[in-house]
């Protein structure tokens, strides 16, 4: 496997697995159904497995497709955590900090201003 799936492809596939319908999944991802369908086919090509049984009336996720969808959800969760971690590192805590202490113990706990 030379190429890795994209985050977009994984998101689309998870949406398809949840909805069971190409049109509704594409709508949930804010893309056209044709672009959505192309992304799912590209994912199948990258993984070299059939993820979806396409029939005229409905979409059925294959057994390996269900396993891959479960792993994709975990991968997407990890990617979201990575983005949150990076966001926290970019924005360290800032602002004013006010401390207060009773006068009898303040000289021992707080430095002189």
Image (spheres, helix red, strand yellow):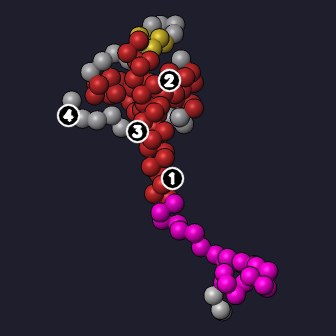
Q: Which mark is residue 7?
A: 3
Q: Mark 2 highlights which residue?
A: 16
Q: Mark 1 highlights which residue?
A: 84
Point 53% across, 17% down: residue:
20
Give the foreground label among 1 and 3.
1
Counting from the top left corner in percent of width and height, residue 11 is at 46, 34
Q: Quadrant of the N terminus?
A: top left
Per the image, is 112 magenta? no
Counting from the top left corner in percent of width and height, residue 102 is at 79, 80
Instruction: Give the residues drawn in magenta, as a range.
Output: 88-110
Label 1 and label 4: CA atoms lie apart by 29 Å
Q: Mark 4 highlights which residue?
A: 2
Q: Earlier in the sequence, mark 2 or mark 4?
A: 4
Label 1 and label 3: CA atoms lie apart by 16 Å
Q: Can you say whether 58 is above or below 92 in the image?
A: above
At label 2, counting other C-alpha atoms closer than 10 Å, the crowd grade (few under 14, some 14-19, many 20 or more) is: many
Q: Are marks 1 and 2 in contact (CB under 8 Å)?
A: no
Point 28% across, 28% down: residue:
46
Q: Horizontally, is 33 left or right of 96 in the view?
A: left
Q: Earlier in the sequence, mark 1 or mark 2?
A: 2
Q: Earlier in the sequence, mark 3 or mark 2?
A: 3
Element on which disc 1 rests: helix
Per the image, is 109 magenta? yes
Q: Nearer the viewer, residue 4 or 109?
A: 109
């Amino acid at each position: 496997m030379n190429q890795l799936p994209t985050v977009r492809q994984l998101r689309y596939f998870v949406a398809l697995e949840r909805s069971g319908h190409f049109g509704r999944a594409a709508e949930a991802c804010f893309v056209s159904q044709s672009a959505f369908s192309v992304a799912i086919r590209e994912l199948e090509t990258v993984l070299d497995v059939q993820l979806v049984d396409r029939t005229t009336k409905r979409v059925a996720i294959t057994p390996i497709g269900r396993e891959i969808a479960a792993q994709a959800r975990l991968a997407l969760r990890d990617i979201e955590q990575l983005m949150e971690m990076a966001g926290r590192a970019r924005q360290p805590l800032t602002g004013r900090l006010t401390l207060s202490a009773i006068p009898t113990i303040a000289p021992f706990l707080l430095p002189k201003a």
